[in-house]
Each structure stands twice: as structure tokens, then as C-alpha cells.
Image (cartoon, grey):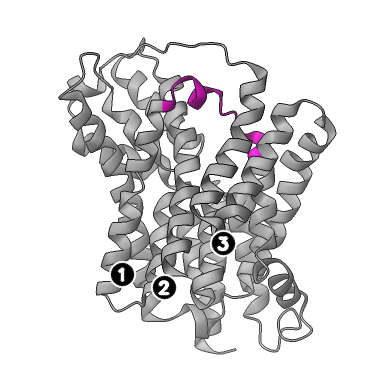
């Protein structure tokens, strides 16, 4: 066993520790960690032309099948009602994606080519399947560090986001109360929403149809109310099984020669930059909007523009109640968070369209 293989097994055990002891995205980090162990045992039969991990990678990652199946399952879990009730909050989701494009520029300045830089920048969306989808298409040799960075930072939302929010807001701003004007949404609107989003986004960026369409198909099944068995299977068994296989397949790529390179540290750093900039852009835009609004916005909800749904919304609500136990901004935070889910897909579609 080489020194590099020993180091990678150490990295793998670190991922297993984070999954088991810290409960950091265990559904994906545990399979990635163990897949990495299997890939770094000398002469391992798990990888190579006849290795089952290599076959999983070729069948599910190279074909982009696994991320798209995960998106179908995610779509069945998302309720777009808060976004439909307050569609204006979609702009916060859009603004929060600016960090992605700033990171693309920074990565290019560090020597990555445009396709590699685009794959690194999308980490900032805090959307693991989108990051994997883009990386597979543009920089498959960087898939391992990009995947690990994406899911590690998603798991670190409760740590990273409060630090940035407190840095950029005052106590008085965090105390702002907001009113949620909940209006009933007709069933036909809920059914039409995923169809219209797919048509509009697909027309603007046809390359995004697979990505956006998978998510919206899952949501259409949810809202139709006529395929409850498919919804239950997609949101449970399908997501669970595919996520496990996805993690194992990613782990197969985490060999010493691929992972132990200077670019890995750069990717981890750029991914953190993208994530931090996305959070900061959302908060700062909310502060800017307050200069012109009569009814002020709690700027913390701007941080929910990333795609870490619903974790980011919960973090913001927890911070709001820490300042004022009677301040409830969860619905506004969820609305922005759902908007961020769509915005991250659109950001991925824009990158795929501009860079292809």
C-alpha cells in the first residue's frame, strides 16, 4: 500500500467520522467514505474494468442518471406554495447565486480552465446533485473533490451561515419582524407551476431541460394527487437507494492520483468562497432593499437564497428567535429557500448554456 493510498483511507475514515459522529449529510458522506476505502485497497476488485464501483460510475454518473433520479425524488418533497404566495422573493434566490459567477472568475484567475471553473463555482449553490451534474459534464476528473466540497459545505450550513449573517447585520436588523400574508393557492395553480417553470426555463436554456424537468416532474406528481404510491416511493426508496449508489460511485473516483493534488485544496477553498459569497449577496441585497421599502425585510432571510432546503430556513428562524423569542420569520425564510432551489437550477442551466 502506497503512502497516497494510506492518506486516502485516512480521508475516507474522516468522512465516515463526520457522517456517524457529527451527522453531517450521512446519506451521502457515509457511502462516499466507504467507497473511497474500497477504491484505495491495492489491487481492489471494486474498481477497474470489471469493478462494481466502476460499473456504477459508468452507468449512473457518466450518463448523469443518478443526479437526475435524485432530483425527481427531491421534487416530490418540495412544496412550492410559499413561493407561489410570495413570488417576489424569487429575486433573493437569484441574487444569492451571484457568488457562483464571482467564484468562476476567481477560479479562472487561479489557472483553472473555464469548464473546470464553472464546475467549481456551482458548489456555491449548495445543491449537491446540481454540482455533480455540472462537474460530470464539464470536469469529470474533478468530480471527487467537487462532490466532497459541495456536501461538506451543505452539512456546515448551521455553522457557516450564522457567522456570515452576524458579520453583515446589526442586532436591530435581526430583530425586524415581518408579516406573512398567506393566501390559499388553488390546486390548478400548483399543478400548472412545475409545467410552466419547465417550459420557460427549457425555452431559455434547452440544455437545462433534463435538470429542471426532473425536479418539476417530481413536484408535478406530488401536486397532482393521483400517484401517491409513486410519490411515496420517489421521496423515500428511490432517493435513498440512488443516493447510496451515487455516494459509492463518487467514492470510486477518490483515488490518490486523482484526489491528492494541489487543485483539490484550491477547489475546497473556492467552494467555500462561493458558498460564503452566495450567503453574503443575499443578505446584502436585503439590506439594500430596506433602503427603499416602507415595510422592512429582516435581512437574514436573504441568506436562504442558497439551495440548502430547508436547512437554511431553519437556521435563520433559529437565529431570529434567539434575538426575539416571539419573532417568527420561518414562512418568509422558507419562501426564499424554495426560490433558491429553483434559482440554483437556473444558475446551473445558465452555466451549462454559456460554457458548453
Q: What is the spatial separation of the Cα atoms under label 1 and label 3, in whole angstroms?
A: 19 Å
Q: Which residue is the site of mark 1?
A: 107
Frontmost residue, 355 versus 300:
355
Q: Residue at x 63, y 29 (%)?
A: 192
Q: Which mark is residue 133?
A: 3
Query: Is 221 placed left or right of 331 in the picture?
Result: right
Q: Label 3 near label 1: C-beta < 8 Å?
A: no
Q: Quadrant of residue 187?
A: top right
- The number of numbered discs placed on residues in the rendered structure image is 3
In the image, which residues are magenta?
75-87
Q: Which mark is residue 85?
A: none
Q: Residue at x 24, y 36 (%)?
A: 285
Residue 200: image x %, image y %? Answer: 53, 43
Q: Label 2 near label 1: C-beta < 8 Å?
A: yes
Mark 2 residue element: helix
Q: Quadrant of residue 273?
A: bottom left
Q: Residue at x 44, y 26 (%)?
A: 87
* Quadrant that contains the N terminus: bottom right
Residue 130: image x %, image y %? Answer: 53, 55
Q: Which residue is the site of mark 2?
A: 116
Amino acid at each position: 500500500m502506497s503512502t497516497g493510498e494510506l492518506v486516502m483511507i485516512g480521508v475516507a475514515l474522516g468522512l465516515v467520522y463526520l457522517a456517524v459522529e457529527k451527522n453531517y449529510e450521512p446519506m451521502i458522506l457515509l457511502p462516499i467514505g466507504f467507497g473511497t476505502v474500497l477504491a484505495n485497497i491495492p489491487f481492489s476488485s471494486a474498481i477497474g474494468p470489471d469493478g462494481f464501483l466502476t460499473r456504477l460510475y459508468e452507468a449512473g454518473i457518466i450518463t448523469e442518471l443518478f443526479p437526475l433520479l435524485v432530483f425527481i425524488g427531491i421534487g416530490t418533497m418540495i412544496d412550492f406554495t410559499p413561493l407561489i404566495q410570495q413570488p417576489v422573493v424569487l429575486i433573493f434566490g437569484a441574487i444569492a447565486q451571484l457568488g457562483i459567477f464571482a467564484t468562476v472568475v476567481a477560479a479562472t484567475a487561479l489557472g483553472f480552465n473555464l469548464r473546470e471553473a464553472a464546475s467549481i463555482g456551482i458548489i456555491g449553490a449548495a445543491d449537491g446533485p446540481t454540482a455533480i451534474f455540472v462537474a460530470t459534464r464539464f470536469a469529470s476528473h474533478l468530480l471527487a473533490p467537487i462532490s466532497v466540497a459541495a456536501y461538506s459545505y451543505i452539512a456546515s450550513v448551521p455553522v457557516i451561515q450564522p457567522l456570515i449573517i452576524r458579520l453583515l447585520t446589526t442586532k436591530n436588523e435581526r430583530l425586524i419582524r415581518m408579516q406573512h400574508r398567506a393566501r390559499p393557492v388553488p390546486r390548478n395553480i400548483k399543478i400548472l407551476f412545475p409545467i410552466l417553470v419547465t417550459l420557460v426555463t427549457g425555452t431559455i436554456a434547452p440544455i437545462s431541460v433534463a435538470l429542471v424537468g426532473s425536479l418539476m416532474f417530481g413536484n408535478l406528481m406530488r401536486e397532482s394527487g393521483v400517484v401517491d404510491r409513486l410519490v411515496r416511493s420517489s421521496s423515500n426508496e428511490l432517493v435513498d437507494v440512488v443516493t447510496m449508489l451515487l455516494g459509492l460511485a463518487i467514492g470510486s473516483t477518490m483515488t490518490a492520483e486523482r484526489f491528492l493534488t494541489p487543485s483539490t485544496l484550491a477547489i475546497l477553498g473556492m467552494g467555500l468562497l462561493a458558498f460564503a459569497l452566495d450567503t453574503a449577496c443575499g443578505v446584502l441585497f436585503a439590506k439594500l432593499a430596506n433602503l427603499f421599502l416602507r415595510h422592512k425585510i429582516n435581512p437574514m432571510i436573504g441568506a436562504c437564497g442558497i439551495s440548502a432546503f430547508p436547512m437554511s430556513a431553519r437556521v435563520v428562524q433559529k437565529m431570529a428567535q434567539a434575538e426575539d423569542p416571539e419573532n417568527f420569520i420561518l414562512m418568509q425564510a422558507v419562501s426564499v429557500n424554495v426560490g433558491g432551489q429553483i434559482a440554483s437550477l437556473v444558475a446551473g442551466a445558465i452555466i451549462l448554456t454559456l460554457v458548453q
